[in-house]
Image: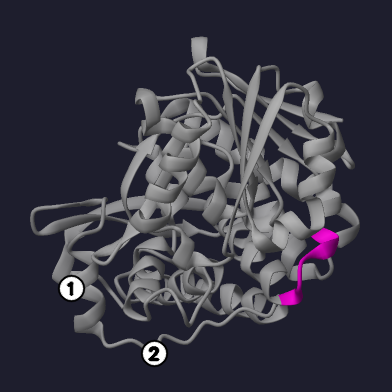
Amino acid sequence: MRRLCVDLGGRSYDILIEKGIIDKGGQYINSKKTAVITDENVNTLYGERFLASLEGDTKILVLPAGEETKSLDRLREVYNFLLEFKITRSDTVVALGGGVIGDLAGFAAATVLRGVPFVQVPTSLLAQVDSSVGGKVAVNSTYGKNLIGAFHQPKTVLIDPECLKTLDKRFIADGMAEVIKYGCIRDEKLFSLLEGGDIWDSIEDVIMTCCDIKRAVVEKDEFDTGERMILNFGHTLGHAIENYYGYGRYTHGEAVAIGMYNITLGGEKIKVTPEGTAERIKGVLIRYGLPYALDVPRNALLNTIALDKKSENDRINLVLLDRIGKAVIKNMPKDEIPF
C-alpha cells in the first residue's frame, strides 16, 4: 500500500493507494450508518463488492452517469436520500465513482446538517489523480461549472488502480488531461515521461506523483486564494468550453486539454511562455487521444469567464507557464486574455 497524508492540522487525512482496496472499504470506514452515492455504471461494476465490505447500516443511491448529474436537481435527490436515511454527523457519506459523483456527494455532505464526514472512493483516472483530493466539492449552474460549491475535506481517500481496467479509452484520455496538467505546472520529469510513451506499467507511480503534487499545494493554500490557483491551468478556458456546449460535447478532461494548449499559445504571444511550449503540449495531447483545437467564439467564452471564480471585477488571475514544470499566476484584464 502507498500512503500520503494531507496535513491540515486537526483535519488531516490519508490518501491510500492499493490494488483491491475497493473490496476493503469497511476497514477504513467506521460508522454506524454509511450512505453510498454512486452512478449506474460504477454500481454495476463495484456496487455489490463495495457494500459487502461495509459493516453497520448501509444504503446506496444510484444516479445516472454523466456530467448532467452534477446539478441542483440531483443534489435535491441526494439530500432527500440522506435525510430519509436519517444520516447524522457521526455517520459517513461515501462517494463511489468519478469526479461527478465525488463533487456531488461531497457537496451534499458539506451542506446537509451543516456538514457530515465523507470518504472518496474514486474509480476514474481523473478522480484518482485529481478531483478526489483537496476538498473542493460543487455542482454546476446554467451560468457555469462548479459555481455552487464548498470546501469540505474528505475523511479518507481510497484509490484502487485496478478500477482503471474497466474504463473505456475516452475516459482514460479524460483523466490523462489532468496528469498532463501536473507535468506542465509542477513536474518536468513527469511531462518528459508522458512525452516518452506508454506510462501504464508505472500508473501507480503516476497516481502517487499527481496526488503528492496536489497534497503539497493544498497544504499551503487550502482555500484557493494563492498558489492553489495553479491547479486550474487550462481550466479557465476548459470550463467555459464545457458550459458553451451544455456539458455534452466534451468531457472535462477534453475541455481542459483544449484550454491548456490554447492558453499556452497565448502565453507565448505575450512572451510569458517560451516559444515551442504549446507544440510540446500538443504532441502529448495527441499521443493520449485528446483534442487541442478551440472551436468556440471568443466572445462566448469571455461571457462565461466573467463568472469564473478566479475573477474580480474586470480582472482575472490567469494560470500560464513560465516553462514546462513551472506555472505562474498573472493578473490581467479579462478582455486581454490571450487566446
Extent of the magenta region: 164-169
Q: Secondary structure at mark 2?
A: loop
Identify the residue at image location x=58%, y=72%. 281
Q: Quadrant of residue 265?
A: bottom left
Judging by the rendered image, the residue that carries numbered circle 2 is: 295
Residue 4 image point, x, y percent: 70, 27
* Quadrant where the C terminus is found in the figure: bottom left
Q: Is residue 166 magenta?
A: yes
Q: Quadrant of residue 338?
A: bottom left
Q: Of the residues shown, which amino acid type is indicated by label 1?
A: Asn
**Residue 206 can be seen in this image:** yes
Residue 179 image point, x, y percent: 64, 57
Q: Of the residues shown, which amino acid type is indicated by label 2?
A: Asp
**Gap between marks 1 and 2, in whole Å?**
15 Å
Q: Is residue 170 left or right of residue 85?
A: right
Q: Is residue 45 magenta?
A: no
Residue 202 image point, x, y percent: 86, 53
Mark 2 Cα-neighbour bin, 10 Å: few <14, some 14–19, many ≥20: few
* Quadrant where the N terminus is found in the figure: top right
Identify the residue at image location x=61%, y=21%. 13
Q: Secondary structure at mark 1?
A: helix
Judging by the rendered image, the residue that carries numbered circle 1 is: 303
Can you say whether 195 is above or below 13 in the image? below
Identify the residue at image location x=29%, y=71%. 270
Q: Is residue 44 left or right of residue 273?
A: right
